[in-house]
Amino acid sequence: MKILELKAEKRTTKGSKAVKKLRESGQIPAILYGHKQDNVMLCLNEHDFTRILHTGTRMIDLTVDNKKESALIKDVQYDNLLDCVLHVDFSRIDLTERVKLRVQLELHGESVGVKEGGVLTHVMKDVEIECLPTAIPEKIKVNISELGLGKAIHVKELPVLEGVQYISEPESVVASVHQIVEAKAVSEEELLAEPEVITKKPKEGEEESAEAAKKT
């Protein structure tokens, strides 16, 4: 994975009003934590961070007050309505220590089952892995060309990547193809037919009383 550089500034203000003011000025609030060091509140240039985010990289060299350290983009909060980043979490890392994180799964190819009329369902969008920071893949490509009707691809069947261990449950379904079940057609006559009225059978003695009442 390519390591990109990002500059950040420390921020001392916090709270909703301060954060709102930051965003209005084209900055993103962030925090850096981990490795038994103090948490540091940061602000990022929105354009610079978005550019890095679009590359798919997760590991960066973060420079704060002329001090550079390796960090992992741990979490990104979005505003889906405004289509913008709200907050970023960075985790300090040691390049010699393995880390756990989730990586995007990208499906490739046209499934045999889909060609036969089935429907593809992408169940798992990302998977948890463990590896050294330098071995973090930007995304994991999953070939679905041989995926037939009624079949599924599981975590245990994902491609083997050097230095990468899958942490997610091995039996978890990544993608599957199922047959379309057509609803039974109902004729107009069936829709207009009067429902059968089911009456309760009278108990012994009640029937005779009813007949006697009719004669009076």
Image: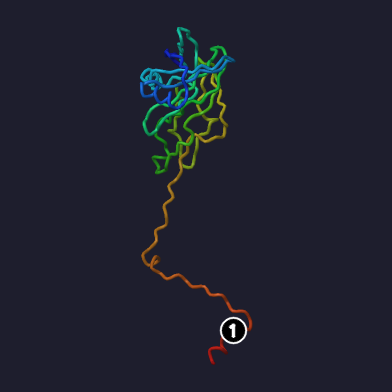
Q: Residue at x 56, y 12 (%)?
A: 96
> Where is residue 110 drawn, in percent x and y?
39, 34
Q: Quadrant of residue 77?
A: top left
| Residue 111 visible in the picture | yes
Q: Residue at x 50, y 11 (%)?
A: 69
**Location of residue 171 with respect to 48 vertically, above or below:** below
Observer-nearest of 55 and 108: 55
> Where is residue 139 drawn, in percent x and y?
45, 24
Observer-nearest of 92 and 178: 92
* Amino acid type of the residue tagged 1 in the rendering: Glu
> Where is residue 142 drawn, in percent x and y?
46, 29
In the shown orientation, is residue 15 left or right of residue 96?
Answer: left
In what quadrant of the picture does the C terminus appear? Answer: bottom right
> Where is residue 16 drawn, in percent x and y?
45, 27
Task: List the single residue furthest toward the bottom.
Answer: 216
| Residue 136 visible in the picture | no
In the shown orientation, is residue 82 left or right of residue 211?
Answer: left
What's the image's color scheme?
rainbow
